Amino acid sequence: MGLISAPDFYRVIRDPLGESRPKQGMEASSIQETADKRNLLLLITLRWLAVGGQIATILVVEFWLGIKLPLPAMGSVVLFLIALNLASLYRWRSAAVITDTELFFEFLLDVAALTLQLYLSGGATNPFVSLFLLQVILGAVLLRPLWTWTLIGVTSACFLLLTACYRDIGLLSYEQTHDRGLPGFLDLRVLGTFLCFLLAAVLLVLFVTGITRNLRERDQRLSELRQQSAEEEHIVRMGLLASGAAHELGTPLSILSVIVNDWARMPALVANGEIDNDIAEMRAALGRCKETLSRILLAAGEARGEGAERTTLVEFLDDVVADWQETRGPPHLDYVHKIDADTGIVSDTVLRQVLMNVFDNALEASPEWINIEAKREADKLVVNVRDKGPGFSPEILANFGKPYQSTKKRSGSGLGLFLVVNVLRKLGGTIVPRNNHEGGASVELCLPIGALSIADEKRNAAG
């Protein structure tokens, strides 16, 4: 019997779905990847809004204001943005990781599309030229500083280029509007500036609100991860401490057991009734100590090699139930097995402790009556434990098998079922809790019979 290492014990800690919990770094990386994907989805949504805004603006300018625009060329840019968004949506739906570099190039394509549209509609004289600032602000939120400064340089260069190279569409200045006797609010530059401000404000509010929500969700998930890591670290320390204590106590208990057994066979001591009673009490106390030691090792993810012996499935179940009934003394126990085809197995302290743990929980919930039914379904052993207690709360059912999930108020409770679930899973079994329609609760344990013979024989051979 040796000490269990931290990595070995950590492998025992799993979630109720049977998957090993990822390391904290891996989990944090996954959270960041999820946040990046959500940010990409926000960018896709804003691009759809930009496409809709461009189409509406082109139609208003062409057909309402009567300003002739190069519709085929500007329509081609809109189609390009639609194709880019469809490609981005495909990337978002795939399992690929979204990187800062990819987001930066998407921004560059957006800037290129905006530059082309401005070139075809007045260049720097177009009031919508200030939308370059929107691209910079969004980039500052999503990208690393290096990419953000690069984006500032690119947009500044595009702005300067549009001051010299553009297609004039004959926008009226404020003076020209006033000279023609038109109201000032019909100045297309002022109107365009207002529309640009309104569009940028709406998009920024939508985007920043979405980013803030993503950050809150990420921080909450990271907080949950830190809490989970602290709980698992506590369990690892508990396992190391328990293994060390068991290692130190195992040998002295074995020596005492041998000595007391020798005393029980000495005629001079047996003849003295008082001493004989003391020896019996000492043997019972040593038996309880060994049982406690086995529970400690079970909690640490190990089991003592003592007590493993060849038996049959029915004999093993009958023996476990009889031992539990003798030590716990339930007022009313209904036990029945429906196993027609008995088979040879190797009994094990681990499985014995698992069953007793489930029986103990049922007895605590329903002190007056519990029912234990065992049956064989094909190559599986199914044990159903029912009680007439208050049943499981929705919270307990939703988190069944997780550590520290218990209705008991005492410190350290909630680890028993957590350990039961993981021991069963290591043997290839399952455990299903449910509330009964007629009241009370039931817990169904399902184990492959092959694991009771093959796995344990290999363990004994290795020991």
Image: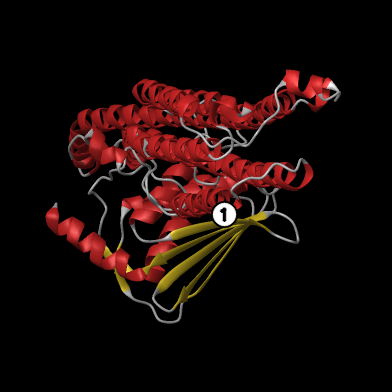
Rendered view: 237 above or below 287: above
Decide if residue 351 is in sight here. Answer: no
Q: Position of residue 416 (x, y in %)?
A: 47, 41
Quarter of image, res 438: bottom right
Q: Residue furthest bottom?
A: 341
**SS category of the residue bearing label 1:** helix
Between 210 and 379, the one lying in front of the other is 210
Residue under pointer 1 = 72
Q: Amino acid at mark 1?
A: Pro
Q: Is residue 397 above or below residue 129?
A: below
Crowding at mark 1 (Cα within 10 Å: few <14, some 14-19, many 20+): few
Q: Residue at x 53, y 50 (%)?
A: 73
Residue, x 49% and y 40% (percent of image)? Answer: 116
Residue shown at 18%/57% (left/top)? 460
The N terminus lies in which quarter of the figure? top left
Question: In this picture, is 386 found above or below 382?
Answer: above
Which scheme is used to colour this image of the protein?
Answer: secondary structure
Give the percent coordinates (x, y) of residue 74: 56, 48
Q: Is residue 101 left or right of residue 123?
A: left
